[in-house]
Amino acid sequence: TDKAIPGGDTVKVEFEDGIAWVHLNRPEKRNAMSVGLAREMNAVFDALEVDDRAGCIVLTGSGEAFSSGMDLKDFFRATDGISDVERHRAYRETRAWQWRTLMYYAKPTIAMVNGWCFGGAFTPLICCDLAIADEDAVFGLSEINWGIIPGGVVSKAISTLMGDREALYYVMTGEKFDGRRAKELGLVNEAVPKDRLKARTRELAKILIDKNPTVLRQARMAYKYAREMNWEQAAEYLTAKGDQTTFVDREKGREQGLTQFLDEKTFKPGHGHYKR
Ligand code: ACO
């Protein structure tokens, strides 16, 4: 393909067999997130959503960090001195990719936590669909340690995955924890040794890439929206979403599944997906 590779100075993208590896790419700053990085991330995610080379996105960090959180210099100090309107824009651009874009992205996303993960880095971590960490990666809600609250949407994000006792414990103490503990807390699906991190992430991405992409997208959206609804609304919405899925699925997965299981007897849904 002659399509340009999206990214820039602060975000690096690599394509490999249907996976787009998106790197926070300021290793010399432990991938601290600046205003400029937010702009690049927004452009990258916009581009990848319609790029056939990206069947699954893996968000990770260059070098020894996933991300050391928001950049104290190039995000906080830099926005202290500008107008309210510009500051509002900087915050909005950061929230855009870290939260809304990732939470409702058209393609499946995996966060691969390869090292330091602090403060603001919890938002994109949590807003990815799935997450795998190096068991020795170091996490921390370090905001309290330097005199701010877990802002942006960090406090909201952690409340969706962590229990209140545990979330408040780390919000209040700023204590660090490792990847194994992140798994116990429900922040990541798995914690694996460093030398298995990339292989295991690749394996999981491959499983997702092999699914019917339309149905996979609809299933992710259905889950994320239904969890915000009451039971009556969810029942109505999910029935409608199911019908919509059948309608928009060009591959006609439901029909394939029924035929291959009931008539041809060539597969059993309990064991894996139908032949695509
Ligand atoms: N903001 C700005 N600069 C940063 C950040 C950050 N969040 N994290 C690291 N850097 C810079 C350092 O200032 C240093 O810059 P320099 O080389 O110009 O002096 C460079 O990145 C390397 O960092 P070191 O501290 O030297 O690396 P080390 O491996 O010793 O420590 C660690 C890594 C533990 C991540 C440390 O850098 C740190 O505590 N960073 C801040 C973590 C944090 O609390 N982030 C903010 C969370 S709150 C929020 O996101 C809203």
Image (cartoon, helix red, strand yellow):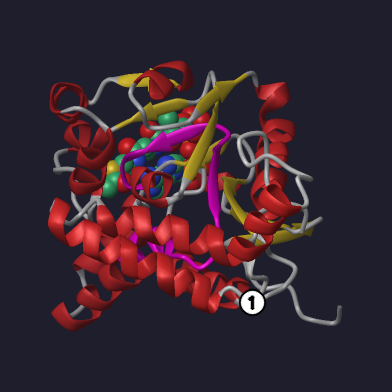
Q: Is residue 70 a member of the stretch shown in magenta?
A: no
Q: Position of residue 272 (x, y in %)?
A: 68, 40
**For numbered disc 1, what is the local secondary structure?**
loop
Marks counted in the figure total 1
Residue sitting at the far front: 263
Residue 210 visible in the snapshot: no
Q: Please give the residue where the numbered disc 1 appears in the rendered image.
A: 250
Q: Quadrant of residue 47?
A: bottom right
Rendered residue at 64%/49% (across/down): 208
Numbered range of the magenta stretch: 94-120
Q: Of residues 180 and 34, which is closer to you in this image?
A: 180
Q: Is residue 116 a member of the stretch shown in magenta?
A: yes
Q: Quadrant of residue 134?
A: top right
Please tell me whether residue 28 is drawn above or below residue 182 in the rendered image. below
Residue 202 visible in the snapshot: yes
Q: Position of residue 205 (x, y in %)?
A: 66, 46
The quadrant in which the C terminus is found is bottom right
Q: Amino acid under label 1?
A: Arg
- Can you tell me which quadrant of the image ligand 1 is in? top left
